[in-house]
Amino acid sequence: MDAKSDLTKTDTQIMKSISASEFCRNLRRYSKAATARGSVPISSNGCPAGAFLSEQKYQHYLALKGRETKSHRIDELPSDLITDIESSAYGTIGS
């Protein structure tokens, strides 16, 4: 089965992973598929290698990434964070 017919067949299904070389040869097609589906999984030598994301999914990823918890060694805390901790009160949220 060729990649084009496989792409059509998977319109209503989760797309199977495509090879990195197939992705490179048909970037425009898979870019449109990512826009329609959210992402296109990519493999290399039969193993998962990553995914090509639609712009919407990428922006969602960045928003989630920005909400990650950050940790610091106590001896490397930024001075503004030390000030915030020192001025905080238990049981209060925000300023």
Image: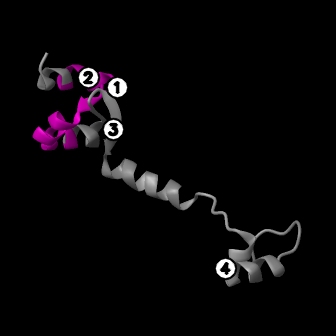
Which numbered disc flags the more N-terminal residue, 4 or 2? Answer: 2
Q: Give the labeled residue for mark 3.
A: 49
- Whichever of callouts 4 and 3 sits on the residue coming sooner in the sequence is 3
Would you say residue 40 is visible in this rendering?
yes
The residue nearer to you, when weighing 47 against 3, is: 47
Instruction: Identify the element where label 4 is drawn.
Output: loop
Q: Measure the C-alpha gap from mark 1 to mark 4.
A: 45 Å
Q: Pick whichever of labels 1 and 3 is earlier in the sequence.
A: 1
Most common SS among magenta residues: helix
Q: Which mark is residue 80?
A: none
Q: Which residue is mark 1?
A: 14
Q: What's drawn in magenta, residue-wise?
A: 7-31
Residues packed near mark 2 inside 10 Å, few (<14), some (14 to 19) or many (20 plus):
few
Q: Give SS at disc 3.
A: strand
Residue assigned mark 2 = 10
Residue designated by label 4: 78
In the visual, does 62 lie left or right of 14?
right
Toward the right, the furthest residue is 90
